[in-house]
Amino acid sequence: MAVSLPSAPPSVRPLSPLDDADLDSLLLIRHFENALLDLFAAGKLHGTVHTCLGQEYIPVALRPFLDEDFVLSNHRGHGHYLAQYEDPHGLLAEIMGREGGVCRGVGGSQHVYRERFLSTGVQGESLSVGCGLALHSKRRGLPHLVVAYIGDGTWGEGAVYEALNMAALWRLPLLVVVENNGIAQSTPTQVQMAGSVADRAAAFGIDHHRLESIDINEIRDVLADPIARVRNEHRPLVVEFATHRLGPHSKGDDTRPADVLEHARRHDWYRLYPQTRPEQFAARDARIRARVESVVQEVEARSPSVWEAGRV
Amino acid sequence: MSSPAPAPDAPDAVMAVPTAPVRVADNLNEALHALFAADPHLFLLGEDVVDPYGGAFKITKGLSGAHPDRVLATPLSEGGIVGVAGGLALAGDTAIAEMMFSDFATLCFDQLVNFASKSVSMYGRRIPMRLVVRCPVGGNRGYGPTHSQSPQKHFIGVPNLALFELSPFHDNHAVLARMIERAEPCVFFEEKSLYPQRMFTGGVVDDLFTFAPLAGPGDWARISVGGEEDYDCLLIAPGGLARRCLGAMRELLMEDEISCQLLVPSQLYPFEAGPVVEEFAAGARIVVVEEGVAGGTWGTEVAAHLHDRLWSQLREPVRLVCSRDSVIPAAPHLEREVLVQQDTIRDAVRRTVR
């Protein structure tokens, strides 16, 4: 079953008003990711990061549904974490290898674990882990579901299908959120995926919703009931967001042509939302921008994280 | 289970076999039953593991009848099975995953190496992961190249992944409990031909050999000629090779007057050299025996440890006995040529001692 929202391109439709908390959450992720790219450019970050610029609205939209639930994230997971915990200090310290990092600098950008949030860096690995977590929840009679964020590229991994099969067979409360941004690193989706996500979900008898909208309130209206069914009826669900990656895969490795990038920019909530409530946006944007700047300054000044290998 | 009538206690050595022989498979099955009865949060997953089939080697017989919610027959999805087991472990449960044949464990390598094992330490603090992957290994049964391997070597050297091997000298309830207590993923290699053989109990192997546990890490068993301290050659082998080693030791003693001791660890990795070093008789030769094919094996790991600790006392380097660098053929006469046999071990000891 595929449900699409009204067909008018969201870029030409104004976004509906957000309350300050949602807008702050979006802005926190946006400015955090921009700060990372600035830190890289300044030679202050090592390794790699994968920013979620343009996709921030997805975890923010889902946040109210996921209070006690387990979130499995991936390499592009900063937004997932910040929407869940609003902890820019802990995440930045983790990425910079500073004291107070969520995982003492061992995991870095793509291996973060805290309470009911876990990210890891191998594509497709999380779905069967999610089945195990969901099985635990179901057997203990807990009302929790498990959310696993994956991308369009993840569907190339056979592990995805093993997990979907078990989730459907065993009626597990597993919500698979697909951030289909049309590109896997540098490879367009149409070059790496035959058929569609919808048909793949249908093959397992798993419900599927595809959402073109980037409007947080619309998304919540559409998903409230299906997510309740995952939780209450133990029906696995695949929700596919047609989304837009504004930035490079990691840093400076974007080979997409200008018109493709411009198409993504036309769907950028950060460009669209000021038309909805310009004064609210300007005030919150300035405030959150300043907040992230101060987080960067504070974390940068911290001492290196301490971890004794093999003694944890 | 049918078993021969108990032999009466008698001074006659031939009659001194344990009074109630228990098959290794039954000991393992009973261990699983006991663990399931004791822990309401223990799960077992695998292909064809539920009753009435009870697993390809019948090790899980009766478990699903007693615990239907926690013993799950899975699709043919080794990666998925270990992924689900990893999720259960992450949630605080204990999970045992059965690979029907260890050859298929290549399909769960990512979940085991990149997720379950790394999760113990890559998040900066220790995360308990109670997960055991059971893997039937070994050949000499004519199953051919993809159902006969001993893949222990492929799992050596992974941080927070411990390796154990089934042995007729080690009670499986204690061995499984030890793996679970480690709170990190473990692989349990089970040599298939051991299943129908009997467990050794009461310190007695047969009319010639006795065994005793060694104190210290690694959970070693020492097999000797009636507890004799002196020997010409020290054999080190995992449980799956014990029968072949015992046969070779008997031949060597009877025909060549070469006396051997055998040390069998329950824990293969991390390798615990301490008890071996303490047991080592100066001047003896050391032969390490394993069934895996040559190249980058457990034996080379053992030899590296022992060379490091014993170099000044060794008369010659540790000798390795492993199967040939070859796929494992199906036809019995060809398979026999590739895999380590009793006479391979015997000949290696003769060459070493003479």
Image (cartoon, coloured by chain):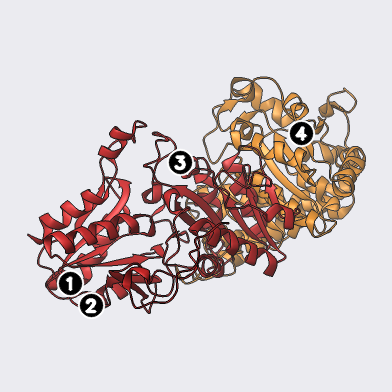
* Callout 1: chain: B
Residue designated by label 3: B103
Residue designated by label 2: B228
* Callout 3: chain: B
Q: Do the residues at discs 2 and 1 belong to one chain?
A: yes
Q: Do tag 1 and tag 4 residues touch (Cβ < 8 Å)?
A: no
Amino acid type of the residue that numbered disc 4 sits on in the rendered structure: Glu
Q: Kindly indicate which chain is depicted in red in the rendered structure.
A: B
Q: Do the residues at discs 1 and 3 belong to one chain?
A: yes
The local crowd at label 3, few if under 14, some if 14 to 19, many if 20 or more residues have their Cα within 10 Å, is some
Query: The N terminus of chain A appears in which quarter of the rendering?
Result: top right
Residue designated by label 4: A240
Q: Do tag 2 and tag 1 residues touch (Cβ < 8 Å)?
A: yes
Residue designated by label 1: B231
Secondary structure of residue under mark 3: helix
* Callout 2: chain: B
